[in-house]
Image (cartoon, rainbow, N blue to C red):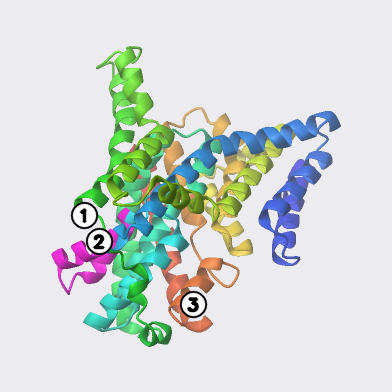
Amino acid sequence: MLIFTMIAAILLLLVLIMKFKVHAFVALIIVSLLTALATGIPVDKILPTLLGGFGSTLASVALLVGLGAMIGRLLEITGGAKVLADTLINKFGKEKAPFALGVASLLFGFPIFFDAGLVVMLPIIFSVAKQFGGSVLRYAFPSAGAFAVMHAFLPPHPGPVASGDLLGVNMGLLVIVGLVCAIPTWYIGTYLFSMFISKHIHVDLPKAFLNTNAINETSVQNPPSFKRVLIVLLLPIFLILFDTGLNTLSVAKVIDGSELWVQSLRLIGKTPIALLITLLVAIALLRDNRSYDQIEKICNNALGPICSIVLVTGAGGMFGGVLRASGIGDVLSNMMSDTGMPIIVAAFLIATTLRVAQGSATVALTTTAALIAPTVANATDLSQFDLCFIVISIASGATVLSHVNDSGFWLMSRFLEMDEKTTLKTWTALETSIGLVGFIIALIGSAIL
């Protein structure tokens, strides 16, 4: 009966989002409430259960996503992205220009969301494509794929933060593991694929770009130096290594983890603190002649666009809270253990199904993590590394087969002025390549560590 309720809840969620176009935030609240009633959670416990799941998820998600968005917005407004891309293109040269654009987007994609990063980078990409010639896919896809990989695999992006939180993952370790997985996934699943697809499918520069000098949109009078941009992008990873590195040394008995200096340095390396420090450093390095009022306005404007994503992620945590309280997760856990299917494989398949059905990668990530969280909790043999690879597996499943119900599909179609058939043959194939390569790397990593 509980499994039937779970299936009915997922189907209702899909119907509300797909057929009746109910916003995912509202749909998840409705489904969470109805699931709580259907599974017999005491009426006086329903609201605390809903609020508990919502609040605990937001506690980690809102901090990381908010700080990350502010850092990304500062880099965007000050012209950091163009400085990064121009420097790398000059270093790598004409033949490696697509590679340089991809590397720039990987770095820039750490703090900034997929769609925002794409909007900032596309005028630069189009200018490079116009200068060097060939299919625009050769230059656009290494960059767009880099943003897609970073958005799916790494905190402070909402999907991996929410799923990591639901599965009890150390966020600092997830950043390191996510980065290690993201780089080969990008190179194999995005860069090599882009070089292949651009030779077989030619896409002209968008007419909208040719008719307007779009590059002026990204021009800044006093852009920061490449060195300053690089400091801002690499600082959070360096700080996070304090936490993960000292924790490893403490477990290995090399140092005493209870010492105050160890705990203090590990506090600095906690992801929210590391991002807060990075934001303050970014303001100091990128401020230029801007007043503090202007800086405050830039940071404030960064928070508006992420509101919807944060709320959807919190609602996914609410659904997870109901599944835990109702016992559905435990029943599903027992079923999965009976089939003998590894958790990492099941996570990928569930995320893929939800992704294809309703389109949103964030909904697929949070819902899948909520569904398998009890299974993970009952599995006593899983290390923190295993948990990280399960998150990467979920992220990979939530990336594959982008099609007409995914906003990213229409974003690429509109920006590159491709028809639906061409977008399916190119962008859908690219996203699927990213997801499959990411899943294979997660499987290998889980088997080795």
Q: Which residue is mark 2?
A: 83
x and y percentages locating residue 219 in the rendered image: 31, 68
| Dot 2 alpha-carbon crowd within 10 angstroms: few under 14, some 14 to 19, many 20 or more | some
| Above/below status of 449 relative to 182 | above
Q: Residue at x 44, y 65 (%)?
A: 431
Q: Residue at x 63, y 41 (%)?
A: 317
Extent of the magenta region: 83-107
Earlier along the polypeptide chain: callout 1 or callout 3?
1
Residue type at mark 2 is Val
Secondary structure mainly formed by the magenta segment = helix
Would residue 446 be seen by someone viewing this image from the given angle? yes
Earlier along the polypeptide chain: callout 3 or callout 2?
2
Instruction: Say which mark, if any, is on residue 225.
Output: 1
| Above/below status of 64 relative to 25 | above
| Nearer the observer, 79 or 133 | 79
x and y percentages locating residue 270 in the rendered image: 40, 31
Q: Which quadrant would the N terminus be assigned to in this image? A: top right
| Nearer the observer, 388 or 222 | 222
x and y percentages locating residue 146 in the rendered image: 36, 60
Label 2 residue SS: helix
